Image (cartoon, rainbow, N blue to C red):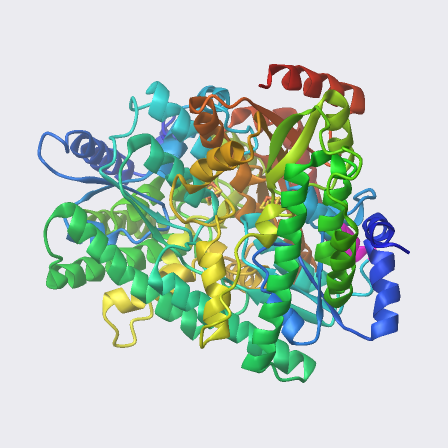
Amino acid sequence: MNPLDRFKSVWNDPNDYARKRKQQTGRKILGYFCSYAPEELIHAAGLWPFRLLGTKGEIRMADTHLQSYCCSLVRGGLEAALNGSLDFLDGAVFPHTCDSIQRLSDIWRLNAGFAHHFDAVLPVRLDTPSARQYMIDVLNEFRQELADAFGTEISDDAVWQAIGDYNRIREKLSTLYELRSRAPGLFDPSTVHRIMTAAMVMERREFSEQITAFLEGVEPDAAGRSDTGRKRVVLSGGICTHPDIYELLARAGADVVWDDLCTGARYFEGRIAEDGTDPLAALADRYMERTVCPAKHQDITVRGRALVDMVRHQQAGGVIFLLLKFCDPHAFDYPYLKKFLDEAGIPSLLLEIEEQPPPEGQLMTRFETFVDMLA
Amino acid sequence: MAENEKKHDPEKEKRKIQAVSRMKEIMTDYYIEAKGAREKGRKVAWITSGGPVEPLIAMDVIPVYPENHGAMIGASKMGAQLCEQAEEMGYSRDLCSYARADIGDAVAKTGPIGGLPEPDMLVCCNNICGTVLKWYETAARFFNVPLFILDTPFIHREFTDSARKYVLAQIYEYISFLETHCGRKMDYERMEEVGRLSVEATQLWQSVLDTCAHKPAPMTAFDAFFHLALIVTLRGTQVTVDYYRQLLDELNDRIDRGIAMVPNEKYRLLWDNLPVWYRTRWLSDKFAGHDAALVADTYTSAWSGMLPEMNGQSFLEAMSETYTKVYINISIDRMFDIVAGMIQKYDVDGMVMHSNRSCKPYSLGQYDLRQMIMDRLGVPTLIIEADMVDERNFSESQIDTRIDAFMETLKS
Ligand code: SF4
Ligand code: SF4
């Protein structure tokens, strides 16, 4: 299977991939929901971090534990845990994110029945030395708990090794984004999205090999396909699990050239310094410096400034906000982000996603109207 | 919040709590003082309901509580209208209605007191939710004033040493923040004195709530919702201590004289989550109509749960643990232990849970909590779906039927 087909098949059924690959490699798997999960430590423990993205199916069993006014990521994640589709997991780790994930952790621990459960209650503010110190402490505690739970040791060397592995992976992903931005026509509209999903769920060694092979196989602008003649937009929001959005948007006349999604650029943003003395401090510093997710606090306008900069730097014409219904942190930031864009003369469109995006016809009309407005 | 309208029914008159008028006086004075702070050269800080107010009092800063304001908006039935204002500004209808109503009123100034006094600084403690973090960031941008965040790590299992160190470090950062923005130094002796008053008021508040362990209960949770305002806003002041002493005396006197809040109290219930502010009267009558008294609730007791274990520490040191361990900053299993203790202490027959669309940290997990209460303690539990301030999310007929059905099962 060529790398792209491999990514696509993983995207198509990550659980099936995980089950089979686990059998082949014997590696234990730890699930996680958020880009603040310290994957490097999981990787250093010889485990494989697996990003949980909700469920594609209907939500039934989770209804006895969660009210309807809870986001589909949390509800879908619990559904998958309860209905057995995550039977390959050895456990999960919950870094502190939002109020909903906070409660999901309890409900999960009390009901899902996996062998292991971790809470890494990271600081919410990421702008002071005491928060940095606390973050390092929590990372240390998590490292210890992991080691105890799986009967291994996680040496500093192992963590440095993992940091190196992750830096390489993040560099590759960032190259992929750069390529798409320079020449959107190089890939099908949803290719990068599928690769990102694969990056977060695949056994990382395999992913690393496959992405390297994939990038080597890209012939920059082979048939002049790079210029699609379409307009350029940026996506902003939490998670996106709907590749159709990229396809529809292309049909409506725009390419996604960059994003500020938890399952997108936020995942690979920021390198970890490899020349320090304390690997956990190095991990903490990436989190402290990376542009925050809205559930964390850095400074009150940082996300607005970063978004405007991103649009300018990417020479994009507008922004599409992709927000999950009932997601408080993102919904609170939306009015101010929009204001920043308005003031910079950048048009934007808000798309709220319940469990599914709006019906295709409706979406197409909204996209077309929006794309028409873009420079 | 006001519960008592004049009606000339001698039976009802007898049951009215006299301290109510004193409370109204104190709250009125307090809002007048806060509104006039500017002219007097005093600073105003907005602070979250679970935030450490004591350092503000010690620094002579007037604390103002947007959540209390939210409750007032709800009780005045202005919630939907002000929430819509915020929705027009782009805030989703699914966000906390305290935040929406308050953001709406900051712009419209059409609420019950014509807008809160504007802040000179903001103090946000996230021990109650992540919503307040986002809400205060919004306020900081809107008013362009400094924001201090006290980050109290959620307790899934235990309060760790690293969390203790982190919170304590922030308490001192908080004090430097105040010193910077008030232009003077903290008087640590005064601080300890305010701390002592705060502990005393909190103890008194606990004693007030405890009077409901008596059968019949001299007041109900609906009264507690009203009398709560002071322990939230002005703990750490002498006024508050005096007030709760007065209230406690009155309640003890009622017990002596056999005055019950619900005339024929037969069923004793425990309330969970925030009040439905625009319907407290209706709900109170509804339950009383079934001879049921809400004798305790997890919401107002959250403030008495803030009693620090001093263990020879200074108030500031004790504070870091106290403020981190508040009721909704702990896991469901820890919440269960507290609820189980209350069920026993107040000898309740059933529990009513308000599944509050606005408050995710309080409401998500209720289904599991309910199951634990039913399985382990055999206490029947009713869930009603509503919202504390946004009356568009209240379906009277549905809730009416559910309460009737629940009471029937309790009676049978
Ligand atoms: S941050 Fe938003 S999308 Fe993510 S789990 Fe929380 S509510 Fe859901
Ligand atoms: S009601 Fe809940 S979500 Fe709203 S401010 Fe209070 S604790 Fe936070």
Q: Nearer the viewer, residue A340 or B224?
A: A340
Q: Is residue B307 in view?
A: no
Q: Regarding ligand 1, which quadrant of the image does it lie in? A: top right
Q: Which residue is farthest right?
A: A1
Residue A272 image offset from top left, x and y in percent: 52, 63
Q: Nearer the viewer, residue A50 or B139?
A: A50
Q: Nearer the viewer, residue B154 or A312?
A: A312
Residue A222 image offset from top left, x and y in percent: 78, 39
Q: Which image quarter is the C terminus of chain A in?
A: top right
Q: Nearer the viewer, residue B91 or B204?
A: B91
Residue at 80% across, 35% down:
A223
Image vertical order of residue B298 relative to residue B119, above or below: below
Residue at 11% across, 59% down:
B187
Per the picture, the main secondary structure of the magenta-coloured stretch is helix
Q: Is residue A293 left or right of residue A178?
A: left
Q: Is residue A28 in view?
A: yes
Residue A1 image offset from top left, x and y in percent: 91, 56
Number of marks drawn: 0
User: Which span is picked out in magenta?
Assistant: A78-85
Q: Is residue B84 left or right of residue B139?
A: right
Q: Quadrant of residue A67?
A: top right
* B317 in the magenta segment: no
Q: Is residue A93 left or right of residue A137?
A: right
